[in-house]
Image (cartoon, rainbow, N blue to C red):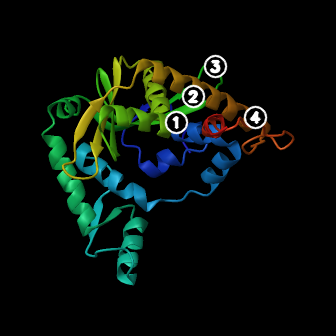
Amino acid sequence: MSDYRGFVEDLDETTYHGHPTSLSVSGAKVMLRAPALYKWQQEHPVHKDVFDVGSAAHRLVLGVGAEIVEVDADSWRTKSAKDAKDAARAEGKIPLLVADHERVKAMADALSSHRLAMRLLSDGRPEVSAFAEDEATGVLRRGRFDWLGESILTDYKTCACSEPLAFVKAAANFGYHMQAAWYTDLAADLGHPAQAFAFIAQEKEPPYLVTVIELPPELVAIGRDRNRRALERFRDCTESDIWPGYVPDDTFAQPPAPKWALYDQEFSA
């Protein structure tokens, strides 16, 4: 495995995701849950079919990524459909049912008429990998920019709802604020003069509404703090080769009571 540093173009996804000594923001999210879970997932990678529509949409919108293979079936229940899916996977391609393929094509068409989104995607380079050492911990961070713009870093997200407030809530739930901080800091450390990080959020149901969203600075600051804790935890676990679960195995877990339970008790007395 090459010791990558800096921006790396044309790095295939398998090599990028399989890099053994670096930490991605997806890995950072898992590290905060439980280091043991992170280590297991690294050693037992599993592909989830639910990601295929998003991956295919990335392919059509960004113009790069794995080839899409349309499987002429209504579902994956039949043996022939399953075999076709497995064959596509074995070749590193994205298998899609006819209905899902039609959906992602309609999503790409809808996005092509969004003026700001297309302006962002007209300036820069797609799917650029990056590697940089975190100065405080010595951990090698990695990231894969959906779109490395000259002044704005852009990430394309398919989602259930692209209404701004709903998306910000989803961002907090799914750790998108960690991603915004991670990629902004990674680019800055590599000397890239990015001024902002924007999400192009697109709904997966008609009319496939698109919204360009910049997360609130205070939320990104929380994400940056979470990233720092994940990097420190990754460093400590790597050095000690001890990967604990949700709490160390010599420690009592003492979680606080759920707020809803306290609320119910207060108003039922």
N-terminal of the pair, mark 4 or mark 3, is 3
Classify residue 191 as left or right of residue 240.
left
Q: Which of marks 2 and 3 is in front?
A: 2
Residue wearing tag 2: 227
Q: Residue 149 carries which label?
A: none
Residue at the far bottom in the pictured view: 79
Whether label 2 touches label 1, CB < 8 Å: yes
* Gap in angstroms between the C-alphas marked 2 and 1: 8 Å
What secondary structure is marked by label 1? helix
Classify residue 97 as left or right of residue 25.
left
Residue wearing tag 3: 136
Q: Where is residue 76 in the image (x, y as percent from the top left)?
A: 37, 74
What secondary structure is marked by label 3? loop
Q: Which residue is at the front of the view, 256 or 170?
A: 256
Crowding at dot 3, Cα within 10 Å, few <14 / some 14-19 / many 20+, comes out as few
Point 67% across, 37% down: residue: 269
Residue at the far right in the pictured view: 250
Vertical order, 71 against 18 (above or below): below
Point 58% across, 31% down: residue: 140
* Gap in angstroms between the C-alphas marked 3 and 1: 17 Å
N-terminal of the pair, mark 2 or mark 3, is 3
Q: Where is residue 205 in the image (x, y as percent from the top left)?
A: 25, 53
* Gap in angstroms between the C-alphas marked 2 and 4: 18 Å
Q: Which mark is residue 25?
A: 1
Residue wearing tag 4: 239
* Gap in angstroms between the C-alphas marked 4 and 3: 15 Å
Amino acid beneath label 2: Asn
Amino acid beneath label 4: Glu
